[in-house]
Image: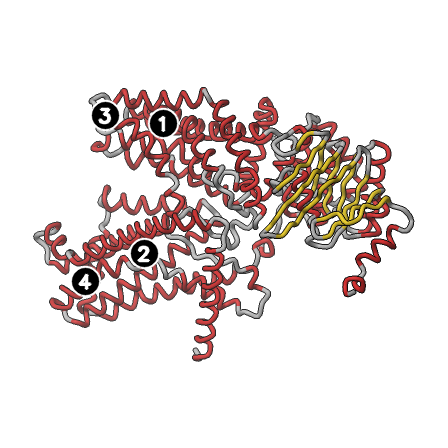
Amino acid sequence: MCILCVELLITMITIFLQHELKSFWRSRNTGKNLAVKIIMGILILYLLLCALSVGFFMDVFLNKLFPKQDLIVSFSGIILVYFMFEFISRTQLQELPTLKVQPYLQLPIKRNSLVQYLALTSIISAFNLIPVLLFMPFIAKVTTVKAGGGVAWAYVVTILGLMIFNNYLALYIKRKASVNGWILVAITALLVFICLGDFVWHIYSIRDLSYHFFGRLFSQPVLALIPVLLAVAMYYINFLYLRDNLYLEELSKKASQKSSTEYPFLDSYGITGELVANEIKLIIRNKRPNSAIKVSCMFLLYGLLFYTKPALQHSDYPLILVGMLMSGIFIINYGQFMFSWQGAHFDGLLVSKMNFGEFLKAKYLLFTMVSTITFILTTPYAYFGWRILIVQFIMYLWNIGVSATIILYTANYNSKRIDLSKAAAFNWEGAGATQWLLAFPLFLTPVIIYLPCKLLGSPNTGLALIALVGLAFLLTRNFWVEKLKENFYKRKYTIAEGFRNK
Amino acid sequence: MIQVNNLKKVYSGLAVVNIPQLEIKKGESIGLVGNNGAGKTTLFRMMLDLIRPDGGEVLFKDENVAGNEDWKNYTASYLDEGFLIDYLTPEEYFYFIGSLHQQSRASVDEYLASQSDFFNGEILKRGKYIRELSKGNQTKVGIATCLLQSPELLILDEPFANIDPSTQIRLKNMLKDINKTKGVTTLISSHDLNHITDVCERILLMEKGKIIRDIATNSSTLAELENYFSVTKMII
């Protein structure tokens, strides 16, 4: 490639980065975003420090874990296992780099520079620093000494190759999943089975595989090129996918015939029912909320992770957490963007002949319906013990009582518009780590109620208290609707203005 | 019907709306004209309680619209696509708005059938969500929704923009008709001076947030407005 082209690309990337920074600082929600970013920054820094210290004392840890094995053997064994788990966390946590490409498409900017920008900036991620901090100290300290510089370099190249391969594979899957949410479900299920196959069923061993591959590097360092080639191929697949999807997706997809739908079972709820029917259509007909539902389905399997472990059954904390997540994940995951889903037509809702209380009641009704369905679907977990079912029911009460109210309260402080129609095309703000921060207060309150009772020796009282609080909120729902309404009227203009701001 | 007192909205030091006094009587048809940035939409938004005024008040039927919801019972409005629920089919949207006004599906269907000329076969049973309609057809859905509500007060922001000439003429006739026969108070903004002087009996001319002229429409109004908007005058 000519030097001029590279120079041009670098200029373009700098310009895009500047625009991104501006859009961040000038955004309506800068304050909130900044706070979240700072907390995230601290967490990431902490994580990196942990990785670095583990990296430095890797030889000590390995000696303790596998006292009978040669250091290099055990080191080689853990690398692929690490990348396996790294891949899982990447699919859950890594955020997709975004750039609103539309304003640039008609300008004399090469499509390829836009795509390269998106593809290259995704390397800027803490995930791509951890392997370096984790493995490089050991390679420098031990591998170089014991196996020589050539092999050490082969290790370095392999690890970097795997890291970049993982990076692009995870992003590719996330991008695919943003169009079709089931892909993420399928991949997660697959990964769970791969892990089960190794660690529970012992059909094969990723450690052995890792050990064999890295063992070969001693005799044939050239093998290090395999991961590099994989990485390059994955980058290219990503690049192609991005390039082909730069077009607005409406152009590439044939519009199918749409028909009107009715939900007769909602008729008896009057206007509230009509609003719920609209919201169900919102969820079904738009990609973004649609994937929120699919994530909720995925969480139904959460119980399998915890309830199967006998060690966890003696404590109530996992039960509380799992119970909360299974019947509440929809409230949390869908509810965190409350009112934003309707941001595009919020003005219309405000001027229509409708009391805002009815709007709020519709939200409660929707939450209750979905939570009830998920609760019923999780009743078979009673197989693992009746206490599990009781806690699930208590947390179901808590969710439809308290969680729903908290989520609707925070909704009054969210005035960031979500563009439903463009959700899948190039606006890839999937479920990243940032949103989980909002869930902290939600998760902590039941534990705060439970903890003192547990310490005083009566955990059942704690559970009963959680149930009572949930029930109390449920029975006083009309009161909360009024409170939320009052609060909304104070914030109404700010929210509406935020939504108008595209 | 509408009473505006000392209404003011300031954005970054600049008064975008500043109306000391304005009264609109029941059954009047008002046309609002003015260049971009004159404050027409902001005025509408304050009338519909979508923006908080920095001062003053808007009264509908002697009641302040801010913090009140009674006016929603007799007011229908369409300012932009932000008023439409775009993932619904037009039919679903009409039924939804109808249900808010306690209208049965049958009566909504009856109304929609009466609008078939206006829709020109482009809205109903097309197998599309509102978001897939063109901007002009979205405007049609918005306007038709307003009329469905049989309002006493109708507020439309640039209804003639984006729609084809035939529909513009049909719309003009509809607006005249509901004003004359049903006594609906209409408040319409437009950049089309021909249409607005044709439809409205009273024209309000806005400039920099102020109503600088209040004209009862007559044969010379169009010329007067054209004179105001002509570029040569601006240069002088």
Nearer-N-terminus badge (4/3): 4
- On the same chain, marks 4 and 1? The answer is yes
What's the residue type where badge 1 is placed?
A: Met
Q: CA distance from mark 2 to mark 1?
A: 34 Å
Instruction: Check the image and report above or below for B23 versus A105.
Output: above
Asked if residue A434 lies left or right of residue B36, the reply is left
> Residue B124, position in %: x, y?
72, 40
Mark 2 sits on what residue?
A127
- Local packing at callout 2 (Cα closer than 10 Å; few below 14, some 14-19, many 20+) is many
Asked which secondary structure carries label 2, the reply is: helix
Q: Are the residues at dot 3 and dot 2 in contact (C-beta closer than 8 Å)?
A: no
Q: Nearer the viewer, residue B46 or B124?
A: B46
What's the residue type where badge 4 is placed?
A: Pro
Asked which secondary structure carries label 4, the reply is: helix
* Marking on residue A137: 4
- Local packing at callout 3 (Cα closer than 10 Å; few below 14, some 14-19, many 20+) is some
Callout 1: chain: A
